[in-house]
Amino acid sequence: MAWSTPDGRYRRFSTGKGLITTSGMLVDAERNRVLVCNEDVGVSRNSAAGTRNRVAQVLEFNLDTDALQQTYDLSSLSHGPTLPNDLTLDAQGNIYVTDSFQPQIYKIDRTTRQASILVRSARLMPADAPAAAQGNAALSQWRGVSPGWLPDCRGLHPRAAVEGDVGERAGGQ
């Protein structure tokens, strides 16, 4: 991991023992820490046999010293492949983590340092088609759907944009 400053300087932050692949990162300046989602999608030089889509961790580093302070293991809370991808905090410093492969949101309690599943719902799983948000829908590569942007999607049923008509709706992209 590294920092990039506004003036373009680059500084290595931490290699972090046990760091495989990072996705979500958050600087919590109030608590002097950097929180990082750590997972193994099988493409890192640190990937290992048997850990692909099985590692789900949040690593907590000291903001000043770069030292690893805490590892929160979420792996045992998942039944199947897991990919913690982003995180946020509440005012008390509790950590909330999303998972791309599991329909759940994890909570790491700041006081007890214990991880749990806050919410588990099928509604949190990725859909086969884009979902409209405030009249627009962003497309990502998912089951053959091409990336693009759909302007003004009010009234578009989520199943209406399927492979074959997405490019036309997104302006031929």
Image: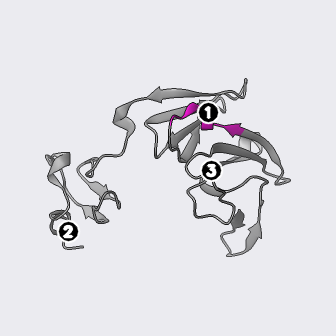
Residue at 65 percent across and 59 percent down: it is 47
Q: Tag 1's secondary structure? A: helix
Identity, as a three-letter code, of the amino acid under mark 3: Thr
Identity, as a three-letter code, of the amino acid under mark 1: Ser
In the image, 146: left or right of 125? Answer: left
* Image spot of residue 38 (x, y percent): 64, 50
Q: Tag 3's secondary structure? A: loop
Q: Earlier in the sequence, mark 3 or mark 1?
A: 3
* Image spot of residue 30 (x, y percent): 73, 41
Residue that carries the numbered disc 2 in the rendered image: 167
Which class describes the residues within 10 Å of circle 3: few (<14), some (14-19), or many (20+)? some
Q: Quadrant of residue 20?
A: bottom right
Residue that carries the numbered disc 1 in the rendered image: 76
Q: Is residue 10 above or below residue 159?
A: below
Q: Quarter holding the N terminus? A: bottom right
* Image spot of residue 169 (x, y percent): 16, 64
Magenta segment, which residues?
Answer: 72-79
In the image, 153: left or right of 98? Answer: left
Point out which mark residue 51 bears: 3
Q: Quarter holding the C terminus? A: bottom left
- The Cα atoms of the two marked residues, 2 and 3, are separated by 36 Å
Front one among 26 and 166? 166
